[in-house]
Image: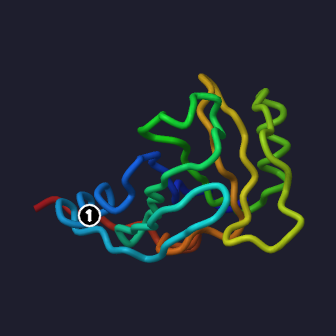
Amino acid sequence: MGKNKLRHIAISTKDPEKTAAFYKEVFGFEEVGRTDTPLAKGIYLSDGTLNMAVLNFRTDQLGRGLDYVGIHHFGIHVADPEETFARLAKAGAKQKTELPTQPTSFFEVKFEGPDGVVIDITEHGWVGASPLDEPAASHSAS
């Protein structure tokens, strides 16, 4: 099995423009896309490795109400979705969404892990995120 990678995090906000501007200005993240769907409107940012979705959700996917702001969910890019789905089921993770049957921006199936944390599982990755096969950065002591 290839190594799975954390490649996505979603932040729920009421003002995606202001929140995205903060991350762009303070950390130098780049805007790599925008979305406006029945689920949410927002901006995709990237640090070159990770995709961060800054979203104003139109539906309550977490059961916390539409006023909830903060970290909404995170996503793992996996090499073998079927094997990962089986391991999630064995570990007791509750599947929240089905495999998309129509083309979507990203292949995602949502699961609920420990403490109610929502995890997106994808085989195709996210815009602005590094692929699975990218070699790890080497760190050398100065």
Callout count: 1
Q: Quadrant of the image for the N terminus? A: bottom right
Q: Is residue 86 above or below residue 29?
A: above
In this view, the residue farthest toward the top is 115
The three-letter code of the residue at mark 1 reads Ala
Q: Residue at x 17, y 60 (%)?
A: 26
Quarter holding the C terminus is: bottom left
Q: Position of residue 62 (x, y in %)?
A: 63, 34
| Residue identifier under label 1 | 21
Q: Mark 1, residues whose alpha carbon is within 10 Å: few (<14), some, or many (≥20)?
A: some
x%, y% of residue 31? 37, 74
Q: Residue at x 80, y 46 (%)?
A: 97
Figure check: 111 above or below 63? below
For the view shown, which residue lies furthest in the left direction?
Answer: 142
Query: Residue shown at 83%/32% (left/top)?
Result: 90
Image coords of residue 55 (percent x, y)? 48, 55
In this picture, residue 124 sits left or right of residue 15: right
Residue at image coords 44%, 59%: 52
